[in-house]
Amino acid sequence: MSVITEIEDLRRIYKRRVPKMFFDYTESGSWTEQTFRENSSDFDKIYLRQRVAIDMEGRKTATKMIGQDVAMPVALAPVGLTGMQHFDGEIKAAKAAEAFGVPYSLSTMSICSIEDVAENTTKPFWMQVYTLKDDDFMQRLFDRAKDAKCSAAIITVDLQLLGQRHKDLKNGLSAPPKLTPASVANMMTKVQWGLGMLQTKRRFFGNIVGHAKGVKDPSSLSTWTAEAFDQSLNWDRIREFRKMWDGPLIIKGIMDPRDALEALNVGADAIVVSNHGGRQLDGALSSIRALEPIMDVVGDKIEVHLDSGIRSGQDVLKATAMGAKGTYIGRAYVYGLGANGQQGVTDALNVIHGELEKSMGLCGRTDINSVDRDILMIPKGFSGDWAN
């Protein structure tokens, strides 16, 4: 059995075990994939200051995200189609997050439903919601999240239009997967994945089929999704969603300081600096470059989290040092899930936690809550000139 010492180990196993259609869904961005690549590579431009002869015993990574105790400032990001990466994938990821002590975020476009995840976990999880036109569906989605005792809602605001994702279009991405000669030939080489899928009946979008008007089975889903997303979304509309949900609210998809202030004004409890993993506007700044200008504007008026590009505990440490109160991993945990189910997600969390704890100590800090910009060396101009 392979020894897992870094996230890349999980990625290699994941690539071998999961059909190409779903590997490409995870491991790609939009258009030229510039932003997708820079989300990760821009972390490499930030250097850590090593300190010595400092007591490094008793290191602590525990902190809080939106008032909730977490084992480290990391949440599992909402990722669609997770149940296609591994059978009952959302349930397995949520169970791994619960056992580790970090938040799990369930995507609207999940395969396992809100109710499925709630029935198989013992602690509250977060529910991610897309901005859809159908008020009735939106209200019922929030109500279902309340009934499941979800402890926070995440409204994703950067998907009014779908970015041009070449690989997904060429692969004919769908759930369940369309049976074409190419997809069948590829799936036949993924025996472990296929045997797992035979063990479950959860193979379509569980939060939508049977819940959205006009969607009674997977065959009608593509028509619904093409028409459901609200291209006319504005901040007044988000205020309406705020009224539908009276619990902690996180707004995800903020990349501009002006939008950060709007999120503050609508009553959000936290924002997530995120470019959707480089899957929306290609050519946008990486999330880590966009973080500091946003922090400069909102300060401590609202909790700021960071998503997109995190592949290591050092990335978590750098984002925290730049002011983020929490970070999100998507691809990193999906690699683990596809590689080895619930244990693979646990492996990913263990890797990131170990890297975070040791790197923090080597920077001369023993408590994640004491980490600040002093441990970093950041090149001039790294965050760009937003004044223009």
Image (cartoon, grey):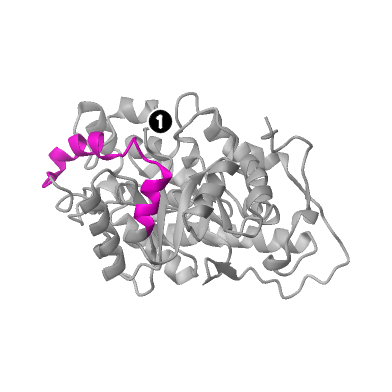
Residue 361 at x, y percent in the picture: 75, 64
Residue at 58 percent across and 39 percent down: it is 39
Residue at 59 percent across and 62 percent down: it is 353
Residue 5 at x, y percent in the picture: 58, 55
Residue at 75 percent across and 34 percent down: it is 381
Residue 8 seen anywhere in this rendered image of the structure: no
Residue 267 at x, y percent in the picture: 48, 58
Residue at 14 percent across and 52 percent down: it is 210
Question: Which corner quadrant of the image does residue 246 belong to?
Answer: bottom left
* Lateral position of residue 219 relative to residue 144, left or right: left
Residue 332 seen anywhere in this rendered image of the structure: yes
| Magenta highlight range | 214-242
Provide the major secondary structure of the magenta segment: helix
Q: Which residue is mark 1?
A: 163
Q: Does the magenta run of residues contain 91?
A: no
* Lateral position of residue 145 relative to residue 153, left or right: left
